[in-house]
Image: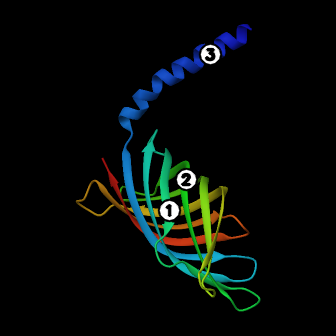
Amino acid sequence: MKYLGQTCVGLIFLFLALPTLAAESRHQFYADSGFNYIDNSNSTESAWTTTLGYSYFLSPFVGVDFGYTDTMSDGATFYDKNGDSQQVKYRSFFAGATIEQPINSFTSVYARGGVGQTNVEETNTSVVPETSQDHSGINPYIGIGAKIQPMYVEKLELSVELKYQDLQNEYSATSFILGAKFSL
């Protein structure tokens, strides 16, 4: 019981110190867009994806990440065994962590990962009327990327990232995205 009290006191002091860390941290909004390969067990098709997000850095190197990803095009078109076409789209609300390592004063590399509430929509476009099925679940994601800050533009960073997202119904998505990050 004695150690439980000491642990609680230590945790209270830790949480009291977090606002001090947060005062030195930065808020960052970002928009990414890029090419996306959606894969199932039979084939891989491409689509366009866009992500809007927010990062809150607890320290210069570690942050939390929240956002929304959606396939903005008609989605990827797959064909089943009968030759019927299915358009596949997905969207995801995600939360995770970001770890960043500066290389020099203008460039840094980062890794991020977490979980997303994903929704995969399969639409059979070979029949009239079209029929749709939705598959939802919580799935992991991971990404690696690099950021560069243009000279003389202090609040802007340009990024390139490779991201992998597990999806429902035996689908996965691998994205190559370019983006802009705006710091407050």
**Residue that lies at the very extreme toward the front in this rendered image:** 129
- Please, what secondary structure does the residue beneath circle 3 have? helix
Are the two marked residues, 2 and 1, in contact with CB atoms closer than 8 angstroms?
yes
The quarter of the displayed image where residue 31 is located: bottom left
Give whichever of 62, 53 is nearer the camera.
53
Label 3 vs label 1: CA separation? 38 Å
**Residue 94 got which mark?**
2
Where residue 152 appears, x then y in whole percent?
22, 60
Question: Which quadrant is home to the N terminus?
Answer: top right
Give the vertical position of 165 relative to 82 (above or below).
Answer: above
Q: Residue at x 58, y 21 (%)?
A: 11
Where residue 103 appears, x then y in whole percent?
45, 57
Q: Report the amino acid beneath label 1.
A: Thr
First reached walking from the N terminus: tag 2 or tag 3: 3
Q: Is residue 84 left or right of residue 60?
A: right
Residue under circle 1?
Answer: 69
Label 1: how many residues lie within 10 Å, few (<14), some (14-19) or many (20+)? Answer: many
Q: Report the amino acid beneath label 2.
A: Phe
**Residue that lies at the very extreme toward the left in this rendered image:** 152
**Residue 8 got which mark?**
3
